[in-house]
Image (cartoon, rainbow, N blue to C red):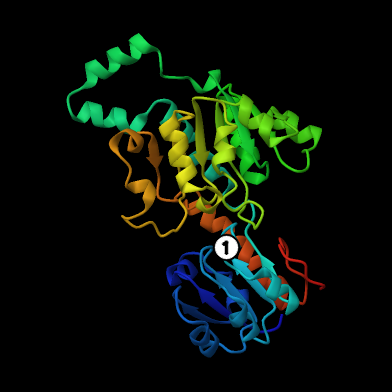
């Protein structure tokens, strides 16, 4: 096993919480740097780095990749890799890898949380109890019958990878009817295990499902895919869930869909333009629209077990590089 130089860009405590086994650690020289520094500063800190391990939201531009001539692999700490210049990496012969599947169960659980949160209007009902309005709110629901059971819903998943399949497995236990769409239909075995039915077009999924949930990465093709046309095609009164990436959604189109009543509510674990500031447009809506938005702070995939699984994948790939083997979960086209 050859000695490797590893440059980490992210939270240094991750390296301490999830270290490699002793034999691999002895073969590594590691420098850790925070996010947000200029490329030149990273390059100076370890100009002969063999490996970059980076926070999933850390920006890794082409000039940094070109400034590290010994670089062989860039590994995201998460599933996302949209902040990495994968094309320049491929041109330079650098593999870009992610930790696909590391947080599938955790994000699926967060998805379920948000689905139930919007169906039962959890945040607003919590406020009602704290303000002494329990009985009027309860009586209103009994009169209107507007609270819904997940088992009565058709749930549409856009994307059916690791997270989508885990979500379907959980929804199966809740007796929801699950449908999905993606470019390639899953195998019959996977469909049966998840009790999920393939819908050939996204438009059909949007028009027939009570809940739409996103489970796909950000690419040039998917960025802001949830635009005015997307929401207009959704079933009137449907619910919208995003535990993938905020960049998938056009914020103004979402607000317009909530204003028009096309959407009943939206549950969002992630917003465009993170880290989210107080001037974010979705945080500055009138009370009637704000009441239709349920947020969580992009925590779906950051459970302890998710990070442990991620670093197991990272250290496995670092070992493979040290032993002259090709890494796994490569997301760009590199001739090895």
Q: Residue at x 41, y 60 (%)?
A: 275
The picture places residue 300, in percent across and down from the top left corner, at 48, 47
How many other residues sit within 10 Å of disc 1, few (<14), some (14-19) or many (≥20)? many
Query: Hey, which residue is sitting farthest left in the picture?
Result: 132
Q: Quadrant of residue 13?
A: bottom left
The picture places residue 147, in percent across and down from the top left corner, at 41, 19
Quadrant in which the C terminus appears: bottom right
Q: Quadrant of residue 213?
A: top right
Question: Which residue is tagged 1?
Answer: 311
Looking at the image, is 271 positioned above or below residue 78?
above
Q: Residue at x 44, y 31 (%)?
A: 260
Query: Hey, which residue is sitting farthest top in the picture?
Result: 143
Residue closer to the observer: 318 or 273: 273
- For residue 330, say whether it is visible: yes
Q: Is residue 328 left or right of residue 209?
A: right
The picture places residue 29, in percent across and down from the top left corner, at 56, 83
- For residue 113, say whether it is visible: no
Q: Residue at x 71, y 75 (%)?
A: 94
Looking at the image, is 164 positioned above or below residue 43?
above
Q: Is residue 324 left or right of residue 219?
A: right
Q: SS of the residue at dot 1? A: helix
Q: Is residue 74 left or right of residue 258?
A: right
Q: Residue at x 45, y 58 (%)?
A: 273
Looking at the image, is 153 positioned above or below residue 311?
above
The picture places residue 150, in percent across and down from the top left corner, at 51, 23
Q: Quadrant of residue 69?
A: bottom right
Quadrant in which the N terminus appears: bottom right
Residue closer to the observer: 255 or 27: 255
Query: Hey, which residue is sitting farthest right in the picture?
Result: 335
Residue closer to the observer: 15 or 223: 223
Q: How many marks?
A: 1
């Amino acid at each position: 096993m050859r000695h490797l130089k590893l440059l980490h860009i992210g939270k240094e405590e991750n390296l301490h919480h999830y270290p490699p086994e002793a034999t691999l650690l002895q073969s590594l020289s590691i420098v850790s740097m925070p996010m947000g520094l200029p490329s030149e500063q990273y390059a100076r800190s370890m100009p002969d780095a063999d490996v970059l391990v980076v926070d999933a939201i850390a920006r890794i531009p082409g000039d940094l990749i070109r400034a590290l001539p010994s670089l062989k692999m860039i590994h995201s700490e998460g599933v996302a890799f949209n902040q990495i210049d994968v094309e320049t990496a491929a041109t330079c012969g650098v593999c870009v890898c992610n930790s696909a599947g590391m947080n599938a169960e955790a994000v699926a659980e967060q998805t379920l949380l948000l689905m139930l949160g919007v169906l039962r209007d959890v945040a607003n009902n919590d406020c009602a109890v704290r303000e002494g309005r329990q009985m009027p709110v309860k009586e209103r629901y009994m009169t209107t019958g507007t609270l819904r059971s997940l088992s009565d819903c058709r749930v549409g998943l856009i994307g059916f990878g690791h997270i989508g399949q885990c979500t379907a497995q959980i929804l199966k236990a809740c007796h929801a009817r699950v449908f999905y769409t993606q470019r390639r239909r899953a195998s019959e075995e996977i469909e049966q295990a998840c009790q999920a039915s393939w819908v050939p077009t996204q438009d059909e999924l949007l028009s027939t499902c009570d809940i739409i949930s996103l489970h796909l990465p950000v690419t040039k093709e998917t960025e802001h895919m949830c635009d005015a046309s997307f929401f207009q095609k959704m079933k009137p009164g449907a619910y919208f869930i995003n535990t993938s990436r905020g960049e998938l959604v056009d914020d103004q189109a979402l607000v317009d869909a909530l204003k028009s009543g096309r959407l009943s509510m939206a549950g969002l674990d992630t917003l465009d333009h993170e880290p989210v500031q107080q001037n974010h447009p979705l945080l500055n809506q009138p009370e009637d629209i704000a009441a239709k938005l349920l947020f969580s702070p992009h925590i779906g995939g950051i459970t302890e077990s998710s990070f442990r699984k991620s670093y197991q994948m990272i250290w496995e790939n670092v070992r493979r590089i040290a032993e002259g083997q090709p890494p796994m979960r490569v997301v760009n086209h590199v001739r090895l």
